Image (tube, helix red, strand yellow):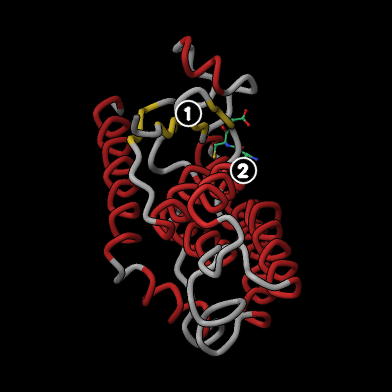
Amino acid sequence: MTPILYGIPASPHVLIARAGLEELGVVYKLVTAVPHGQDPEFVRVSPLGKVPALTDGDFSVDDSTAIVSYFDYKLHGNDKKSIFGNDPQSRARIVKFEKYLQIEGFDLASRFFRHFRNGGSIEQLTEIQRNAIKVLDYLESELQDNGHFVGSSYTAADTALVARLMAYHLARQTLDNNKHPKLSSAYEKAIKEARFSKILSDAEAMMGKLADRSAESTP
Ligand SMILES: N[C@@H](CCC(=O)N[C@@H](CS)C(=O)NCC(=O)O)C(=O)O
């Protein structure tokens, strides 16, 4: 049975899950579910009402890291292709950055979306942008020259980074190539990869539809 991922393409946490699943080559079906949607199956698999949530046969779990880690283990166990690292030091660094991106990455994505939804002031937007730059400064300082946090292939930390930078782009923010050259080139490289450009296009299409709908409803 094909695993089902519940969520909406432009959700920052759905992007994190999808970037990881694409990297792992998981075939899944994306079923539209908005946070706190009332579809009974979604309510069952996501008791907190958050997206993303996953079902794979009888199993379900609702958290982007848990979803990626579930498939990583299912496909790779502890073999050398795990995207969570294959030695203690790599695993520690990958988990550290994935977690940082989950928590502090809020400043790159959801804070902007919340601000636009609530119609905040320019001063507030400037403050949010300033916070986002601090997060980007730190990530820039930790990224290797090859654009990965660890090693030379995409790990769960890298896919979380790609997802966060996609959300930053969806929030109409632009990376500054002079200030953040490693992040800028890592992002440009990633979105040229079909597996990542596909999920970015889905998210952009959804944002486009939302913009059209709000333009239509504007008198
Ligand atoms: N830790 C969860 C967080 C998921 C999350 O907060 N998703 C947002 C959408 S991006 C949501 O569903 N928000 C609704 C809420 O927090 O009530 C994960 O990584 O999947």
Upstream in sequence: badge 1 or badge 2: 1
Q: Quadrant of the C terminus?
A: top left
Quadrant of the displayed image that contains ligand 1 = top right
Q: Residue at x 37, y 75 (%)?
A: 188
Which residue position is annotated with label 1? 55
* Position in image of residue 186 (x %, y %): 45, 77
Q: Give the mark count.
A: 2
Question: Does residue 82 appear to the left or right of 123 in the view shown?
Answer: left
In the rendered view, would you say 137 is above or below 205?
Answer: below
Does mark 2 have its CB less than 8 Å from ligand 1? Answer: yes
In the rendered view, would you say 27 is above or below 180?
Answer: above
**Inter-mark Cα distance, 1 to 2:** 12 Å
* Position in image of residue 15 (x %, y %): 46, 49
Local crowd size for mark 2, using a 10 Å CA cut-off: few (<14), some (14–19), many (≥20)? some
Q: Which residue is drawn at 67% across and 83% down?
A: 141
* Position in image of residue 193 (x %, y %): 31, 69
SS for dot 2:
helix
> Could you tell me the amino acid type at mark 1?
Thr
Which label number is shown at residue 66?
2
Identify the image quadrant of residue 125. Answer: bottom right
